[in-house]
Image (cartoon, rainbow, N blue to C red):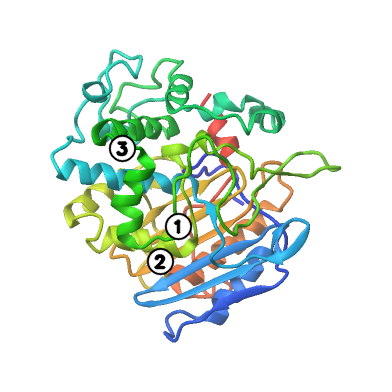
Amino acid sequence: MRKHLPIAAFAALALIAGPAGAASAACPDPSLDPDLLESKLEAFAAVGDYSVVAAVADGDDSWTGAAGPRTVDGGEDAEPDDQVRIASLTKSMVAVVLFQLEAEGELDLDDPVEDHLPGLLPYTEAITVRQLMGHTAGLGDHFTELFPSLAQGSIADLRTDMGVHHTPEELVALGTQEPLLFTPGEGWMYSNTGYVVLGLLIEEITGHQLRYELDDRVFDLVGMDDTYLPRTNSAGFRGDHTTPYITTGDDADPYLDTTGLSHSVFWAAGGVVSDVDDVNAFYRAAADGTLLTAAQLAEATDFRTTGWGFDYGLGFAGTKPGCPDDPDAVYMGHNGGGVGHMTYSFHSLDGERQATFTWNLDNSHGYVDWEELQRTQDAFIAAALCGVDADETAVEVQPGTASSVEELFALD
């Protein structure tokens, strides 16, 4: 595994229990090869102790699959419609709301945040909405302050504090204790805290809670019936889900169930719970004019090189999967790690070719072989986005995924 290529997320490489039964729904379109997709999904799940759920689409044709049990103890097999924390994919959804508010004349993306939320950020430098959306504001990150023991490879803070609820204002205060990392607009650094600020901005402008704005402006409009932003004073899931775990480093007790992690630690930066089909529906709606105009989508996907293994626009990440028929084609989407659920979701710019998959163990201590994990993950991506068998056709897939806990603490 390319262990030092970070992802756009908080917490990490997810993995959990073997391919103890795979389920799939095939489509009639030969451009989606159900047998190839299922075999690559099973191979990916078989590398370690994790389950994986996936949804792939090409135009109106789709395929869904799942492999492995929902928990490390076995039991019920994962299903393609199981709910997961999609983590930083939330940022794309928050960005859509901000684009809509700009179109309605409620704000300008170049407005200083201070104009709408005076006194929230403790800096004299002007920081704009656009800079927060694109991670060019220079803010640090609150997650490293919430669970500092992770920097030493210890989950001690998670064991004791993962159920503690925090207000968005508390998260902003934690993430802005230090000076700016660079002059706003003159650098790039991924910041979850910046998106917490944007969530507060949406609430200030609309007068409504962020979860209601996401429901009205995104989820209900697209028909994402299994998607929601939980209350910040809650934990867990409303429906069937794969259980999220993080490795502990203790052979006698190797996995920590993080179902009880407070949703408040993510909120606008990564709090949404969804399933893989709904995620595909969202990105297609962003591309087909349902959620964004063509001009807004072009602005959101005007990617800059970041040095983090992916490019970034405004709430949307970009990558080139390197498909043999069009190696320079750019795909949009996002990666996300939710301290147990790891999601990869990328889509052609027209929203026609899509792939979203999630596995459910944060591999912070390297329990699973990184290189084999990367190889089988890349093979599934090649099958999903390119329609080819990577074991027979050379495909160099980007971005790689890695432990975002490790990379996030590299901010210090």
Contact check, label 1 and label 2, Cβ < 8 Å: yes
> Residue 141, relative to residue 290: is it above or below?
above
Q: Nearer the N terminus, badge 1 or badge 2?
A: 1
Q: Nearer the viewer, mark 1 or mark 3?
A: 3
Q: Where 340 sits versus 116, above or below?
A: below
Residue flagged by tag 2: what amino acid is it? Gln
Amino acid marked by disc 1: Ser
148 vs 395, nearest the viewer: 148
Residue visible at 44% across and 19% down in the picture: 173
CA gap between label 2 and label 3 equals 32 Å
**Which residue corresponds to mark 1?**
345
Q: How far separated are the C-alphas under marks 1 and 3?
A: 29 Å
Q: Position of residue 130 (x, y in %)?
A: 26, 35
Q: In the structure shown, which secondary structural element does the residue marked by tag 2 occupy?
A: strand
- Label 2 sits on residue: 354
| Drawn side of residue 83 relative to residue 332, left or right | right
Kindly report the distance in space between the C-alpha atoms of the residues bearing marks 1 and 2. 8 Å
Rendered residue at 22%/46% (across/down): 100
Q: Position of residue 106 (x, y in %)?
A: 17, 36
Q: Position of residue 300 (x, y in %)?
A: 27, 48
Residue at the spot of label 3? 208
Judging from the image, what secondary structure is the residue with disc 1 in? strand
Q: Is residue 321 visible?
A: no
Residues packed near mark 2 inside 10 Å, few (<14), some (14 to 19) or many (20 plus): many
